[in-house]
């Protein structure tokens, strides 16, 4: 199974490109699922589905044709399926503060619930072998990073904190509930968490396998959008995902002759040149600005034709180089990390337990070290040609 993850700044057109890619894959014969992970779903709108057809079906896959289905994750349905105990406890706590029942139910939708629900579906489809390709239409960049980082974060919590948290509360709950204004969560709450974790088993490895998962970054030929695309590239690399394509959407046609667009054309030309230089050797696709809104099957097929050659396979694995790797050179252990666009002053790193922690700005990435390196500490680091090499030595 292949997973193609479309991400980018809000409004760049990633939903349209994800939908067009899914259509093209289905045309090539792949059993394809396009799943929207953006809370502000627009996937059904992209296909111009009538409300009467799609209403009430947003929580279940909807068939477009024999080989293509779409799925918008409905968080209210997911709470009933997967988050019942956790949601019930959060609601009960909120109600003790005087918040009304309806408002408490809304506030009980915690950050990450929708992303983790989507991950569970991906894992389910993988185990069932239901699809050949899953195209993920992700939320804007920041939420996309939460989407890919959350399984690893949950894995760390389950291994390091969960057993002690569950055991401690079990011991103190009878006494604490007598004096606490809020009843502590029961063991069913922790059972719910453990069940959710079991449904996500294997997802981190799946996302970091370049033979399975590839990130397609969608951008526009504008300076502000490009800067966010660069940051996204760094952050996905830090999270172990492989970016194998950049799609520049809404490029003005070269034959356009209009004084109104002269400055736009010059600006786009500069940014496009910058994009080609920055992302090389990652391939860059250019998608023209159409004369009409891309909405509905016919328009999406037109977009797919502009994006792909007739027999071009979007599911083909074109890039497998890992964002980081472990090496031993002349008796020295090294962690080699790709950090495109990062500057020396932006990078911080330290050792925590058996993990190397790399920081770029506000982002922190925990890189689990192999057994042979877990007792070592970082001694020196050098940044050359967008590659950070960290030497590990005995402390």
Image (tube, helix red, strand yellow):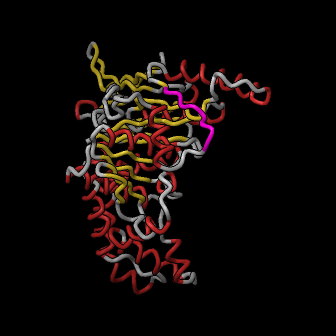
Q: Looking at the image, how many numbered discs can be counted on the residues?
A: 0
Name the residue furthest bottom.
178
Residue 134 position in % (x across, y down) = 33, 46
Q: Nearer the viewer, residue 337 or 120?
A: 120
Instruction: Give the position of the N terminus as an image quadrant.
Output: top left
173 inside magenta stretch:
no
Provide residue 146's location: percent of width, then percent of height.
46, 49
Task: Indicate whether 72 appears above or below 350.
Answer: below
Asked if one can make out residue 54 in the rendered structure from this viewpoint, the answer is: yes
**Looking at the image, residue 322 lies above or below residue 58:** above
Quadrant in which residue 323 is drawn: top left
Along the line of sight, the residue nearer the viewer: 289 or 110? 289
Q: Could you tell whether 219 is left or right of 334 in the image?
A: right
Where's residue 199, x and y in %? 26, 58
What residue is shown at x 54% (from left), y 25% (from top)? 341
Looking at the image, residue 119 sits to the left or right of residue 228; the answer is: left
Which residue is located at x 29 percent, y 40 percent? Answer: 2
Residue projecting furthest to the left: 128
Is residue 287 in the magenta section?
yes
- Up the image or down, 130 lies above or below 58; here it is above
Q: Would residue 355 be visible to someone looking at this image?
A: no
- In this view, the residue farthest toward the top is 330
Frontmost residue, 94 versus 344: 94
- Percent coordinates x, y for residue 142 in the rendering: 53, 46
Q: Which residues are magenta?
A: 285-292
């Amino acid at each position: 199974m292949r997973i193609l993850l479309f991400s980018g700044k809000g409004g760049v057109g990633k939903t349209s490109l994800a939908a067009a890619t899914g259509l093209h894959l289905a045309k090539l014969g792949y059993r394809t699922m396009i799943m929207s992970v953006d809370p502000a779903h627009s996937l059904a709108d992209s296909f111009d589905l009538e409300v009467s057809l799609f209403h009430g079906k947003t929580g279940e896959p909807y068939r477009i044709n024999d080989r293509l289905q779409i799925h918008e994750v409905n968080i209210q349905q997911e709470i009933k399926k997967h988050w019942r105990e956790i949601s019930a406890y959060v609601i009960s706590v909120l109600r003790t503060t005087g918040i009304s029942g309806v408002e408490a139910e809304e506030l009980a939708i915690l950050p990450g619930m929708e992303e983790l629900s989507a991950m569970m579906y991906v894992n389910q489809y993988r185990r069932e072998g239901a699809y050949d390709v899953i195209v993920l239409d992700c939320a804007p960049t920041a939420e996309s990073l939460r989407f890919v980082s959350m399984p690893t974060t949950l894995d760390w919590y389950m291994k390091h904190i969960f057993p002690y948290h569950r055991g401690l509360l079990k011991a103190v709950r009878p006494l604490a509930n007598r004096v606490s204004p809020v009843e502590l969560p029961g063991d069913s709450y922790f059972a719910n968490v453990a069940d959710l974790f079991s449904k996500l088993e294997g997802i981190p490895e799946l996302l970091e396998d370049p033979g399975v998962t590839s990130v397609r970054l969608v951008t526009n030929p504008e300076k502000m959008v490009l800067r966010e695309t660069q940051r996204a590239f760094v952050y996905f690399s830090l999270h172990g995902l492989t970016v194998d394509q950049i799609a520049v959407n809404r490029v003005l046609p070269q034959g356009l002759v209009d004084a109104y667009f002269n400055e736009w054309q010059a600006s786009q030309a500069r940014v496009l040149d910058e994009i080609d230089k920055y992302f090389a050797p990652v391939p860059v696709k250019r998608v023209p600005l159409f004369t009409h809104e891309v909405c509905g099957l016919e328009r999406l097929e037109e977009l797919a034709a502009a994006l792909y050659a007739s027999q071009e396979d979007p599911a083909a694995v074109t890039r497998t180089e890992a964002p980081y790797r472990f090496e031993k050179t002349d008796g020295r252990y090294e962690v080699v990390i790709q950090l495109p666009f990062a500057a020396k002053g932006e990078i911080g790193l330290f050792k925590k337990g058996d993990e190397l922690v790399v920081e770029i700005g506000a982002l922190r990435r925990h890189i689990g070290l192999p057994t042979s390196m877990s007792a070592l500490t970082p001694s020196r680091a050098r940044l050359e040609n967008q590659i950070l090499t960290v030497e590990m030595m005995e402390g």
